[in-house]
Image (cartoon, grey):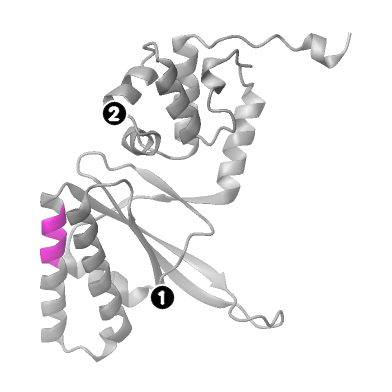
Amino acid sequence: MNATENTPPGRLLTPAELAVCITVFRDARRWTQEQLAVIAGLNVRTIQRVEHGWPAGPDTCRALASAFDFADTEAFNKPFAIPSEDALKAVQDQFNQEHVTFTAIPLSTGEQLARLAQTSTMDVSELAIDMGREADRRFAALMEDFRNYRDCADVYTETQKRKVYNTMQACIDVLKTLGVSLRYAEHKVLLKWGSDPDSNPMSANVLYVIGFPVGKEPVLFATPKSGGFRL
């Protein structure tokens, strides 16, 4: 008897099994239900129903398979080989190799953000999900103020710094009215500049600023290790 004969044939997932798979795949990527809904083009309520074991239609299954980058978007509509614990661990290990996970620290004041500017070398900033054009515009304006201040904070007088704090605070307050809650994390990295293999790496402090929906802020968030830094 060969290995293939020892492998149980695939079968359609039950709603309960699909719920476990979707939850595991989502957790492996550190996505909230809201993030998965946006990526899959589904309603958050649909994600909640699926993860609670309600039956999912073919279109929903296709959207979920696409969100998780399945080569075959019909995967959840076909007989499915139930992943083993080792297979699920391999997915998690690969994700951990490609991403870095941080504790999501609340960012609520302009002074707090300005002080972070003085200790950061570069930043990665984004809204976790699409929250509308106005939220995008306000968030971009906040981070532009942040970078402008970071570039010349050492020459500001205390009075000028207070004005910057107030300007940033106003942006943060507007974002909150638009349903955006800010979280941040800091990460020290070693970077090499140029093509000289013998050059010494430079220490840098990367600040991550992420906007989440108010009331849906995660405890942790993950970002690709190769994410684009802004100087």
The C terminus, quarter of image: bottom left
Q: Amino acid at mark 1?
A: Leu
User: Quadrant location of residue 175?
Assistant: bottom left
Q: Which residues are magenta?
A: 169-175
Residue 221 place in picture, x, y as percent: 40, 47
Residue 43 badge? 2
From the viewer's perspective, is residue 211 above or below residue 197? above
Which residue is identified by label 1? Answer: 231
The residue sitting at 19% across, 61% down in the picture is 138
User: Quadrant location of residue 15?
Assistant: top left
From the viewer's perspective, is residue 39 above or below residue 184? above
Residue 56 place in picture, x, y as percent: 40, 15
Question: Alpha carbon of mark 2 to alpha carbon of mark 1: how far?
Answer: 36 Å
The N terminus, quarter of image: top right
User: Quadrant location of residue 96?
Assistant: top right
The residue sitting at 27% across, 24% down in the picture is 45
Residue 5 badge? none
